[in-house]
Amino acid sequence: MGNSKHFINSKKTTVPILVSVLIVLLSAFWYGGRKKWELAGPEMATSSSLSAAYEEKLKQNPDDPVLKYNLAYFYYRQSRFDEAEKLLLEILGSSRSDAELIRKVSYNLGNSLFRLSEKTDDSRQAIELMQRSLDQYRAVIEYDKERQRYVSLDIETDQDAKYNYVVAKNRIKILADQLEQKREAQQREKELFVLLKELLTEEKQIQTQLQLLQSAKSSQQGRDQRNSLLKKRVQNLELLKVVKERIKQMFQSQKSPSPTSPVI
């Protein structure tokens, strides 16, 4: 993890001493992040009483971006990523937010969107969320580059943001590949069922023709036609067997557990 980024304290509010102390203790863990997307901190960080205290303060100061940022932290710790995202987006749209706060918001919005993408079973939605996450990390990196250009060459690009950017980009590729594989599998499934329907229809027609020949007078032409139909039926039944086996294998593969996702 990179250097600790301090948790923001609102100048407009006073909170109980216990909450203030806990905020200081937890300050290093919200913005910095961990390389493998785990945020560390005391277990009390998930306490609903702490987020409730900030929710009450936010009711009194609904436009305070700092209060929103701090409340978003507790929502994130409680895995309430959609609520954290909502607050962080409100901060980005606020004219009261300074550039450094926007930078921190972008980083943590990237984390929240990444987590939301992990929770959905919809591959397309997961890719969309991951792309938005990627955009936020890119914004942090671009902001640092601008500071290097206009403020000081000694300013370093946030290493956590760079790392998370690479992780999100690779994850998008994995999800896109999985989506394409799913599309191809659905196409193969469709083709198999079309073929199965055609073979069953043909089998029914052969049986009807054989019954008609059986009831008609026996002749050399009839016997030749019957032998031709029987030969065709054997081929048809062999193909039916292959198609049914492939369909069976297809359903078995769908029921089997998917490979473990890579550790990121």
Image: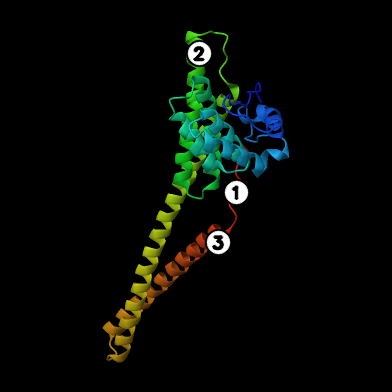
Q: Are marks 2 and 3 in contact (CB under 8 Å)?
A: no
Q: Which mark is residue 252?
A: 3
For the residue marked with disc 3, what is the amino acid? Gln
Where residue 82 appears, x then y in whole percent? 52, 43
Note whether 154 is above or below 215 in the view shown: above
Q: Nearer the viewer, residue 227 or 169?
A: 169
Specify which label sits upstream in the sequence, 1 or 2: 2
Q: How many residues crowd around disc 3 within 10 Å: few (fewer than 14), some, or many (20 or more)?
A: few
Q: Which residue is mark 1?
A: 259
Tell me the element at label 3.
helix
Circles 1 and 2: CB atoms closer than 8 Å: no
Horizontal side, residue 12 vs residue 123: left or right: right
Q: Quadrant of residue 22?
A: top right
Per the model, the C-alpha gap separating discs 1 and 2 is 43 Å
- Categorize mark 1 by other alpha carbons within 10 Å: few (<14), some (14-19), many (20+): few
Name the amino acid, label 1: Pro
Is 237 in front, or is 247?
247
Query: Which mark lies nearer to you, 1 or 3?
Result: 1
- Mark 1 or mark 3: which comes first in sequence? 3
Q: Is residue 171 visible?
A: no
Pair 1/2: label in front: 2
Q: Residue at x 62, y 43 (%)?
A: 78
The residue indicated by pointer 2 is 147
Relative to 231, residue 112 above or below: above
